[in-house]
């Protein structure tokens, strides 16, 4: 009985070993994935995207900038997405003859992406698998098409939507009705004066975190009040207030761009945030009642006397 049990255990171990051998197949190599191109992201310092426009990007001091059709800081995440297109898996490859370009819509390509010395030309789609035809040199590649929206995007889609640079802090903020200057003692001097420093902290945080929901080109010379943000070691940035309601629209004329901002955070950019507790004063009733800034209304006594100085 014991011998039979031992024999069964040995046979079971042999079967298990054979099954493991068949499953893992020692010595078998994983299939190598072929990419469209093998590029070193850190070595690419210029990138060109041709669709309906020609958009040129260049790396400056470790950061990506749009160089054409206008100059502006680029969205680093979106640049990364363009670089990653070159790493897409090539599912099939064929020699490409010049007379076959029209067949794959490569004679009039949808877009062309140039990453340093690597040039990728994007044509039509495979009607069965809906995979994209891509030409690289004299080779035709088939890839899964999950990046066309990046290739068809406009130049403004690639602009960094932050209003202020990431690595510097303002030392001057000039708004309509408010001037704030950072003194040598590290304290902000406000004109008109205010004894509520928390308001200045809110204002600084609002500007340093402000991001537009949309960026567009300026189609005509903007008219409006000026906002100026100063910095210790670089030129100030100026915005023109094109629109306050329903959303805030700021134009930066040196770049020819306008930034659309929405929500309460946009309103905080134009004045110091109210921090006192208590219910707000009653607003004027009536459809045609003039709009009054909240803090201006608080400063106006109901007796009709001249209001004291306050922060608008």
Image (tube, rainbow, N blue to C red):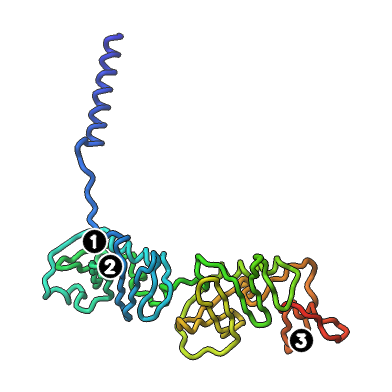
Check disc 3 and report its element: helix, strand or loop.
Answer: loop
Q: Which mark is residue 220?
A: none
The answer to whether residue 2 is left or right of residue 309 is: left
Residue 63 vertical placement versus 17 (above, below): below
Q: Nearer the viewer, mark 2 or mark 1?
A: 2
Query: Does label 1 or label 3 sit earlier along the sequence?
Result: 1
Q: CA distance from mark 3 to mark 2?
A: 60 Å
Say few, some or many: other residues with alpha carbon within 10 Å of mark 1 (under 14 / 14 to 19 / 20 or more). some
Q: Which residue is mark 2?
A: 115
Assign the C terminus to one quadrant of the image.
Answer: bottom right
Looking at the picture, how far across and down is residue 287, in whole percent? 73, 87
Judging from the image, what secondary structure is the residue with disc 1 in? Answer: loop
Please tell me which residue is depicted at 61% across the width and 82% down the height of the picture.
244
Which quadrant would the N terminus be assigned to in this image? top left
On the picture, is 241 further left or further right than 68?
Answer: right
Quickly name the residue at label 1.
37
Crowdedness near tag 3: few (<14), some (14–19) or many (≥20) residues, C-alpha within 10 Å? few
Q: Is residue 67 above or below residue 21?
A: below
Q: Quadrant of residue 279?
A: bottom right
Between the C-alphas of marks 2 and 1, the distance is 10 Å
Residue at (67, 67) in percent of width and height: 187
Residue bearing the label numbered 3: 286
CB-based contact (under 8 Å), mark 2 and mark 1: yes
């Amino acid at each position: 009985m014991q011998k039979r049990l031992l024999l069964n255990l040995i046979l079971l171990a042999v079967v298990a070993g054979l099954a493991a051998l068949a499953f893992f197949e020692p010595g078998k190599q994983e299939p190598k994935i072929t990419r469209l191109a093998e590029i070193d992201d850190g070595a690419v310092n210029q990138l060109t995207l041709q669709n309906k426009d020609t958009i040129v990007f260049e790396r400056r001091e470790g950061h990506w900038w749009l160089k054409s059709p206008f100059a502006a800081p680029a969205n680093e995440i979106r640049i990364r997405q363009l670089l990653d297109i070159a790493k897409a898996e090539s599912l099939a490859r064929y020699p490409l003859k010049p007379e076959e370009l029209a067949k794959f819509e490569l004679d009039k390509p949808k877009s062309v992406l140039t990453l340093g010395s690597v040039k990728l030309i994007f044509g039509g789609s495979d009607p069965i698998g809906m995979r994209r035809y891509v030409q690289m040199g004299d080779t035709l590649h088939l890839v899964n098409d999950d990046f066309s929206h990046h290739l068809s995007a406009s130049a403004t889609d690639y602009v960094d939507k932050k209003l202020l640079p990431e690595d510097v802090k303002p030392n001057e903020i000039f708004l309509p009705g408010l001037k704030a200057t950072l003194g040598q003692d590290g304290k902000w001097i406000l004109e008109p004066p205010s004894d509520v420093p928390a308001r200045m902290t809110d204002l600084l945080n609002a500007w340093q975190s402000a991001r537009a929901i949309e960026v567009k080109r300026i189609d005509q010379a903007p008219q409006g009040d000026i906002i100026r943000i100063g910095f210790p070691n670089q030129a100030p940035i100026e915005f023109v207030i094109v629109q306050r309601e329903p959303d805030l629209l700021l134009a930066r004329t040196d770049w020819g761009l306008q930034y659309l901002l929405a929500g309460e955070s946009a309103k905080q950019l134009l004045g110091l945030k109210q921090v006192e507790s208590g219910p707000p004063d009653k607003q004027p009733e009536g459809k045609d009642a003039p709009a009054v800034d909240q803090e201006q209304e608080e400063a106006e006594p109901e007796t009709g006397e001249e209001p004291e100085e306050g922060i608008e």
